[in-house]
Image (spheres, rainbow, N blue to C red):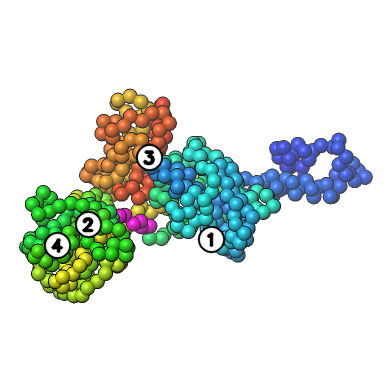
Amino acid sequence: MNRPITPGLAQGAAAARLSSSSDGVARDAGGMPSLREWAARIALAFTVAVASPLQAADSIVVFNEIHYHPADNDHAREFVELYNQNSVDVDMSGWRLSGGIDFDFPEGTTIGGQSWLVVAADPVAVEGALGPFTGRLDNGGERLRLRNNNDRIMDEVTYNDRGSWAVAPDGSGATLSKITPLTASGPARNWRASWRVGGTPGRENFPPAGSPPPTVPVPLVEFGTVWRYNESGGDPGEDWATVSHEGAGDWQSGAGPLGFETNPARLPVPLGTTLTSPFDNSPFVVTYYFETEFTLSEAQVDAVRGLTMTHSIDDGAVFHLNGVEAGRFNMPGSSDAATFAVSGREANLVGPVALPVVGLIAGVNRFSVEVHQSSLGNSDIVMGLELVMTQSLPDPNARPALSISEVAAAGGPDWWMELVNSGVTPLSVDGYVVSTGGGASPDHVLEPGTLGAGEYLVLTSAQLGLVPADGDRLFLQTPSRAGVLDAVVVKNRPQARRASVPDG
């Protein structure tokens, strides 16, 4: 709290200026400064006293999130987010961004009250963004300015990855995010790394305290995933989905979606593998079989909150997760290799459809699909799908249990780093990732194991497959690389870090 200001108590440069008596200061008959002079001094001293780094921003529209170094150096995903602190809309026609990037806001641009506005290097890559801006956001830091239509600077920030600034936004995929949107943009203490990779463009940076843990979508199977398939027409038996058919005689492999379509241009997702025309099969094939795998860590299984599927099927299908039926589409209640689908269906996109998560396991999971034709003589067969898991992340308002506690000096084959579980319960480290970002070195996925409360885990250069140099950055990421827990810059000296204050 600022102390009350009284005449003659102004400090610093302001006090030096106010004490001058040789430049025509108005004085009363006794030689003392006039009341008007005292008022001016008080106003100036008060301005100096309150202009601290912790002050709220004095601009209505401020910088709120900066994605300056996306993962894998995907510069198209660079963006800058603004926030309108006012409760009413602000017309930004003629405003512009300047500094390392330049962007002129088009006529009619408005930012809603207490809302966000995103400007991206490639607006196609960032949903809902304006752009493109010209120039690049410097990975090492630079000054950004927001100017209004009179060229007045409305807000500015000079960010970097050194000193008090967070390390994680420089290459892990996390963004530089303002902790509270009503604070000033200049001080590093008002910023930290985003809780999720890719940040939260156009949305609140951090949920209010006490909110449920945030979740992120994690793709498990994509439309272009490689599948094993069987189009022979043979009956593999009712338990076919309980075993893998890798290397089996009638099974082939190809990228999805898989099928044959007489009018492929109408498919929502182009075929990745073309199957034999149903007209060329003799005898006619009623049921086609497909299977693929994905791997989950124990930590991922513990954090799963949902599983959804979006599919493109012609005509009907039965879906299996680890040998157990997980759902049906356009099929009767029971079926075998000779069962027809209920009706003819085009391969439109359907979903997302919720699937049970109880069948997911730590390790290799197999997803199997049998696609049925609706009648003899059908001309098309299509199977394509994506499977997405919803995974919870650690509470961004709480200290993460797993963090980097110590890092050896850069260089040398005996380099090592140390992790600590600062939580109060044992923690499975299976699937957590140590990376350098940008693809410079291979990521290291931690092996299955449990770290007790307060216990440490030492990882050597040989285990990690890297020997970091002075200035290299290390990131500790959640399974699936969906969030960043901690980050550190390796230096030419050992670093012991307090587990209570992870970077980011």
Label 4 belongs to which residue?
280
Viewed as shown, does residue 232 lie left or right of 124? left
Residue farthest along the top direction in this orientation: 412
Near-viewer residue (75 or 302): 75
| Distance from Cα at disc 3 to Cα at disc 1 | 31 Å
| Res. 384 mark | none
Q: Amino acid at mark 3?
A: Gly
Dot 1 or dot 2, earlier in sequence: 1
Q: Real-space Cα distance between discs 1 and 4?
A: 58 Å
Q: Is residue 222 found inside the magenta-colored segment of the image?
A: no
Indicate the quadrant where residue 144 lies. top right
Amino acid beneath label 1: Ser
Pointer 3 residue: 437
- Name above or below for residue 342 compared with residue 349: below
Label 4 is placed on what type of residue? Asp
For label 3, the crowd category at 10 Å Cα-Cα, with few meaning under 14, some 14 to 19 and many 20 or more, is many
